[in-house]
Image (spheres, grey):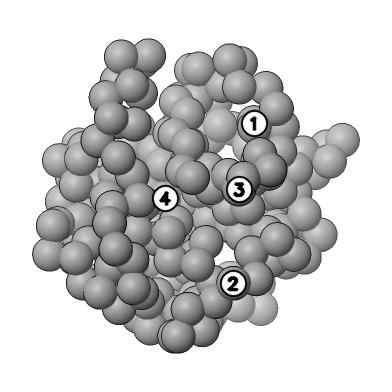
């Protein structure tokens, strides 16, 4: 089940938010060794203070098995402030029709079921959720920064990947910024490739979120 939580409403869901930050710490600090702040088992940064939209994949036992974060690009973004080297010189992405996705991660200990393309079912649902939210929000694109290994995974999953520039090395990892088109057609193609029978994000979920915001 996918759960959407607006950052301004995070205090209403303390258990889920706690699990999310702990999963991010395990993935980005412990597993990947990124230079992130891991404080008392939480990974959190200044962009969590900007009222992001959190998307959480929650299993039947109430455990978070995957998550990502969305921010509007009309304000501060990680792409602009942290990963600007991934953009062509002079390019600025700032549009109400483009949101930034960051902190995409999956609990690989819990998410073991894989589809025929080798993608975990949770990863496929998260990717579909990403594009579906874009469609519901009337966006043109989602922008994100990934490594070249993740780019191969996204292409295999049927995601509409458009490079903004050639990869650059950040630390030891070839990294690049990409756009993903948000449309009914791109959602349908991703569903077809990954065998998803219906939309992961229900319209009523979006409506409840809008009423709460």
- Per the image, the residue denoted by label 2 is 113
Can you say whether 56 is above or below 113 in the image? above
Residue at horizontal 71 percent and vertical 38 percent from the top: 19
- Per the image, the residue denoted by label 4 is 101
Residue at horizontal 53 percent and vertical 55 percent from the top: 104
For residue 17, the mark is 1
Can you say whether 88 is above or below 67 in the image? below
Element type at marker 4? strand
Can you say whether 159 is above or below 93 in the image? below
Residue at horizontal 59 percent and vertical 72 percent from the top: 113
Which class describes the residues within 10 Å of circle 2: few (<14), some (14-19), or many (20+)? few
Cα distance in 3D space between marks 1 and 3: 15 Å
Cα distance in 3D space between marks 3 and 2: 12 Å
Disc on the earlier residue, 2 or 4: 4
Q: Are marks 2 and 4 in contact (CB under 8 Å)?
A: no
**In the image, residue 206 lies at what x, y percent?**
30, 31
């Amino acid at each position: 089940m996918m759960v959407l939580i607006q950052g301004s409403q995070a205090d209403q869901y303390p258990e889920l938010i706690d699990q999310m930050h702990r999963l991010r710490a395990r993935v980005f600090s412990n597993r990947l060794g990124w230079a992130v702040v891991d404080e008392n088992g939480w990974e959190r940064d200044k962009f969590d203070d900007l009222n992001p939209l959190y998307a959480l994949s929650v299993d039947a036992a109430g455990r978070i098995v995957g998550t990502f974060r969305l921010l509007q690009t009309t304000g501060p973004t990680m792409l602009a402030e942290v990963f600007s080297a991934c953009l062509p010189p002079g390019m600025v992405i700032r549009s109400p029709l483009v949101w930034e996705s960051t902190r995409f991660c999956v609990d690989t200990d819990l998410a073991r079921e894989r589809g025929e393309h080798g993608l975990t079912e949770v990863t496929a649902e998260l990717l579909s959720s990403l594009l579906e939210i874009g469609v519901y929000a009337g966006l043109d694109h989602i922008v994100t920064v990934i490594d070249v290994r993740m780019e191969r995974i996204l292409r295999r999953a049927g995601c509409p990947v458009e490079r903004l520039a050639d990869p650059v090395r950040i630390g030891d990892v070839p990294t690049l910024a990409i756009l993903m088109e948000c449309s009914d057609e791109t959602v349908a193609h991703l569903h077809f490739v990954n065998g998803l029978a219906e939309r992961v994000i229900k319209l009523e979920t979006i409506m409840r979120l809008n009423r709460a915001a």
